[in-house]
Image (tube, rainbow, N blue to C red):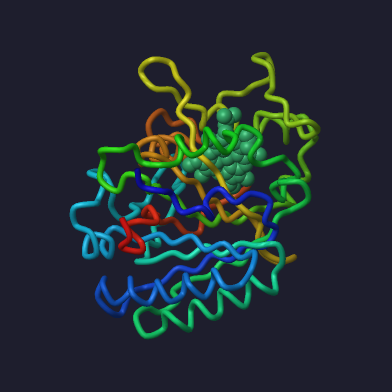
């Protein structure tokens, strides 16, 4: 059985740094530079390093280990000109740990190690806000599965290409906190679909069809809820701020369906949250299991 990258499930870290790269060398050269970067991160206590590949680069590295529906991010469109933009890159590194200093050092040294094979295309430093809250003040992650279950939710099943790996969605969302904060509490709760205090799901009488919860709770054909494992963090300063959304899944289809429902593409009902926050990036990555990353089986 292949093993998921442990950093995916390392909870409680307060400092985050996401780096997206464009490759300037071939897949094997990138993989070998990554081995050095991962080794250096291991040596710095407390910093987790998770690696993901865009479809183009991963197909070069392991053509037989590409899930059938895995590809580059395409823009997702909805009513009123709403668009989730595509900003796909080749490689993604997520560093997270207890404090910003060690995370910064490892991010910088990883980028230096990779500089011969890839250039930094985007970076998103992030932080844990209060007790796992989004900057809107609402708890983010209430319905995340607990870790033993999260491994099943987030990793590709045995027997499938890239088994033990994860499909990753990375999107940077910029909030309009002034507009959101100007809403009365009841309306803010309706946007999310949960209460601000206690993060309790609103009852049927108060749950609106375009609340975030109404849009992202989806079920399979047997009525079983389709879950993902979210590891988002807050980012930014006083001028621009929001959420670096990161989700791990055993398949891409459920995340595609959530995005489509948020954008309102299918039924025209756009997630009310998208009236107060807009995505500025969007990419799919594949976080391979440790065995495929290191060549150790
Ligand atoms: C501006 C961006 C976003 C913000 C601020 C946000 C915030 C939240 C909050 C506050 C909750 C309720 C508490 C919880 O269960 O975690 C939630 C739930 C959830 N969100 Fe988001 N979210 C964002 C984007 C997304 C995206 C892009 C997806 C998927 C593609 C997504 C999927 C989910 C799921 C699956 C749940 C759990 C629903 C449930 O089972 O009740 N979210 N989000």
Residue 231 versus residue 296: which sits nearer the camera?
296
Q: Position of residue 276 (x, y in %)?
A: 63, 46
Quadrant containing the C terminus is bottom left
* Residue 117 relative to residue 261: left or right: left
Q: Residue furthest front?
A: 297
Q: Residue furthest left?
A: 64
Residue at left 77%, top 29%?
A: 186
| Depicted 61 relative to depicted 25: above or below | above
Give the quadrant of residue 62. bottom left
Q: Position of residue 233 (x, y in %)?
A: 63, 54
Residue at left 64%, top 56%?
A: 242
Q: Position of residue 239 (x, y in %)?
A: 71, 66
> Can the viewer see residue 273 in this picture?
no
Regarding ligand 1, which quadrant of the image does it lie in?
top right
| Depicted 91 relative to depicted 289: above or below | below
> Can the viewer see residue 262 in this picture?
yes
Quadrant containing the N terminus is top left
Residue 64 versus residue 89: which sits nearer the camera?
64
* Residue 87 relative to residue 68: left or right: right
Give the quadrant of residue 184. top right
Q: How many numbered marks, from 0 up? A: 0
Q: Position of residue 10 (x, y in %)?
A: 59, 51
Residue at left 35%, top 56%?
A: 291
Residue 256 versus residue 160: which sits nearer the camera?
160
* Residue 41 relative to residue 67: left or right: right
Residue at left 34%, top 66%?
A: 90
* Residue 163 relative to residue 209: left or right: left
């Amino acid at each position: 059985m292949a093993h998921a990258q442990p950093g995916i499930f390392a909870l409680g870290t307060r400092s985050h740094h996401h780096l997206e790269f464009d490759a300037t060398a071939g897949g094997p050269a990138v993989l070998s530079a990554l081995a050095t970067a991962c080794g250096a991160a291991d040596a710095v206590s407390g910093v987790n390093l998770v690696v993901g590949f865009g479809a183009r680069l991963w197909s070069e590295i392991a053509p037989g280990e590409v899930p059938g529906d895995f590809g580059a991010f395409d823009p997702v469109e909805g009513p009123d000109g709403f668009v989730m933009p595509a900003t796909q890159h080749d490689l993604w590194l997520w560093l997270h740990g207890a404090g910003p200093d060690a995370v910064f050092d490892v991010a910088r040294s990883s980028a230096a190690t990779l500089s011969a094979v890839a250039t930094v295309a985007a970076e998103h430093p992030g932080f844990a806000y209060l007790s796992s809250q989004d900057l809107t003040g609402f708890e983010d992650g209430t319905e995340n599965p607990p870790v033993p279950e999260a491994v099943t939710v987030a990793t590709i099943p045995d027997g499938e290409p890239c088994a033990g790996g994860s499909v990753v969605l990375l999107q940077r969302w910029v909030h309009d906190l002034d507009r959101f904060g100007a809403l009365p509490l009841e309306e803010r709760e309706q946007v999310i679909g949960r209460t601000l205090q206690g993060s309790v799901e609103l009852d049927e009488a108060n749950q609106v069809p375009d609340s975030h919860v109404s849009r992202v709770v989806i079920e399979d054909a047997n009525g079983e809820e389709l879950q993902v494992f979210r590891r988002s963090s807050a980012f930014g300063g006083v001028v621009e701020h929001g959420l670096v959304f990161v989700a791990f899944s055993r398949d891409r289809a459920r995340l595609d369906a959530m995005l489509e429902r948020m954008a309102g593409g299918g039924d025209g009902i756009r997630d009310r949250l998208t009236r107060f926050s807009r995505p500025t990036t969007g990419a799919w990555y594949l976080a391979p299991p440790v065995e495929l990353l290191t060549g150790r089986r």
